[in-house]
Every structure is written in C-alpha cells, then in structure tokens.
Amino acid sequence: MIILPVEQWLQEVLAGDTKLVALLPKYPGANPCIYGYVAPDNAPYPVVIYSYHSGSDVYGSGTARIMSHLVYQVKAVGEGATFANLAPIADRIDELLHGASGGVTGLSVLSCMREAPVAYPEIQNGIQYRHLGGLYRLQVRPEEV
C-alpha cells in the first residue's frame, strides 16, 4: 500500500527539520507534536497534522500501476482566536514540502507541490481551534524491486 511509505516520508521530512521542531511543543517522551490524522488527547498545542485527502493512480499497459498522485492536507492546528501564532509553523511546512522530492524504502517521491492553502476555524467543547496549512500533491512511484 503506497499510503504507508508516503506518510513515513512526510513524518521524516517534518520531524527531521530542527526549525519546525523548535516551533512546536514536545509531547511527553520528547517527541515533536507532528501526527498523522489525529493528535493524542493530551497533546500540547500547537500541533502539525497530516492526512490523506484524495488521489489517483496512473496506469501503463494493462494493470501495471506506474505512479500515484496523492493529495495530503498538512496543517498547523492551535487553540485561540487568531491564526497569527500558526503562521510561522505553516510557513515552515510550506518551505519544507513545496518543491520537495526524495523517498524512503520502497518509494520515490518525484515531486511535492502545494496546490491550495487551507485556513479555517472550529469550535470543540467551547474551545476555538484554528487550522492553517495547505493541500500538497505528491507524485510518487514504488521503487522497483
């Protein structure tokens, strides 16, 4: 499944950057607050969340899957009534991902480009949260065995 190595690549790129990690609190155990899909209930804010949004496969002859186009939402999430404290985090995410390429075992990331910004508020249990980031299209292909 191509999703798992893509998410490993995202985690490595984001958590491996000292500038981004310096902007985030540490979860107990000294891990930076960067998560796939959801943060733990007791995670300190702000956090970075990445999640699969949509995608499509590119086929060659017959059933041979050549590559995939995957869209991920990658965003900073924080408590409060303003986006101001999230802007440096979202900017750093964009610096890291827009134009990036690379790979992990079993996967080549040919390109990663932001295709749309993301910004919205929500209220949960009377607490305001803000989300700021982008939708990133990754062109990926499995490494040949």
Image (cartoon, grey):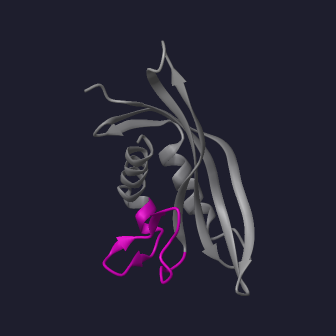
What x and y, as percent, mark residue 89? 55, 62
Quadrant of res 114: top right
Q: Position of residue 21 (x, y in %)?
A: 41, 65
Side of 40 where 79 appears, left or right: right
Looking at the image, which is closer to me, 126 or 80?
Answer: 126
Extreme-front residue of the structure: 62
The one of 1 and 53 positioned closer to us in this rendering: 1
Going 42% across and 44% down the picture, which residue do you hit?
6
Tell me if residue 17 comes above or below residue 60 in the rendering: below
Q: Residue at x 72, y 59 (%)?
A: 119
Q: Is residue 110 above or below residue 128?
A: above
| Residue nearest the viewer, comparing 27 with 6 | 6
Q: Percent position (x, y) of residue 108?
A: 37, 32
At horizontal 53% and vertical 24% (from top left) the residue drawn is: 58
Magenta residues (range):
20-45
Q: Quadrant of residue 79?
A: bottom right
Q: Quadrant of the C terminus?
A: top left
List the single residue furthest toward the left: 145
Above or below, comparing residue 81 to residue 37 in the picture:
below
